Amino acid sequence: MSRGSVGVSWLVRAGTAAVTAAVLALPTLTYIYVKQRVQLGAQGSPPHVGTLSFDEARRYTNATGDGDSFIVLGYHDLVSGGLDSSATSTRRVSVSAATFVEHLRMLRLAGYTSVSAEQAMSHMTDGTALPSRAVLIVFDGARPRDWTYADPILKAYGFKAVLCIEPDTIRKKRGVTLSWLALRTMVKSGRWSIGISGSQDDVLSGPDGEVGNALVTAQWLPAGRYESDREFESRIREGLEADRRKVVDEGLPDPRIFSYPFQAGYPLGPLTSRLAVANRAVSSVFLGSILTVSPDEAVDDSWTSRRILPRLEVYESTSAEILFARLRDAAGIR
């Protein structure tokens, strides 16, 4: 066989091997691509809404305050369109994506700058200065709509947000919640920080079968007594430490912020007696926590000294005008 024929034969064999390798790899590459697309979901473009009127823009832009206001906004869910007025009360915490756009436009015009969980925690623990008119935007849960709706809107307006998750919910409800892959992708964008959300699970709270939220309720034990403050604090701390480890084990940054579960009527009423003990456990695991304490409460030294950030809950009915009024009342904006 001539030297030229040997060369051609070698090229043919090499080409055949390359094609074979590509064909064999195709199912794996296709699986990885499809898996990522399925787990992440498609993002939509921010919905178009009408621009603010001149009077609105002038009022937001010219509003003045003390320059040191720090606001936490609590969102629960975004939906694509308008909401059904006949929906049950549990849907009242959903906000349309178009309304979220209006909120962020208003915040931008009013001179607010969003901060990350790390910036907020550094301010709370070390007194690190925040931008004037700082706002911390927080979502609870791990809903796919946080990626498909909230993320592109945040990107469009240059804002950041914190997503507080329950690790066990993600593990138990795969396909219903955001995947760990999606969460890692969101964090890599630089727009999202991850925190831990308090469990919605209940514990036995009395001898007659009463139940209460596990995070703020003393458990009725089989021994026929309530757990002591020390037992209660230990149970909460161990559960929170386990949640932190689960997040880190999935390749995400160590979460240093905790969000108490939302409760209508605000949790500082009948739960106050246990809140102080729960907060000791929370503070031993996290740098700070987020808690709904009243309709309109800004962050100040009285709260940061306890390493708690009070949040303003955002509801279906919270228009940009209403939200601005609440910000004005909470932070002394004129």
Image (cartoon, rainbow, N blue to C red):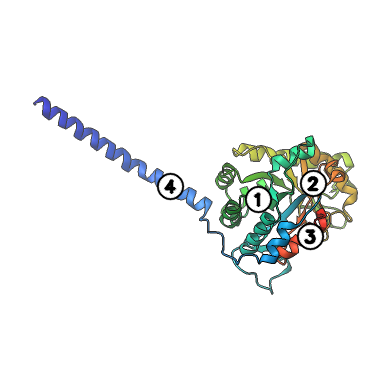
In the rendering, which numbered label is found on residue 68?
2
Q: To which residue does mark 1 refer?
A: 169
Residue 224 visible to the viewer: no
Residue 225, relative to residue 2: is it above or below?
Answer: below
- The answer to which of marks 4 and 3 sits earlier in the sequence is 4
Which kind of residue does numbered mark 2 sit on? Asp
Mark 4, other Cα within 10 Å: few <14 / some 14–19 / many ≥20: few
- The answer to which of marks 1 and 2 sits earlier in the sequence is 2
Q: Residue at the far bottom: name it.
A: 86
Which kind of residue does numbered mark 3 sit on? Arg
Instruction: Please name which of the two marks, 1 or 2, marks the residue nearer to the observer.
Output: 2
- The answer to which of marks 3 and 2 sits earlier in the sequence is 2
In the rendering, which numbered label is found on residue 326?
3
Residue drawn 74% across the image and 45% down it: 258
Q: To which residue does mark 4 refer?
A: 31
- Kindly report the distance in space between the C-alpha atoms of the residues bearing marks 3 and 2: 16 Å
- The answer to which of marks 1 and 4 sits earlier in the sequence is 4
Which kind of residue does numbered mark 4 sit on? Tyr
Residue 101, relative to residue 115: is it above or below?
Answer: below
Report the number of discs: 4
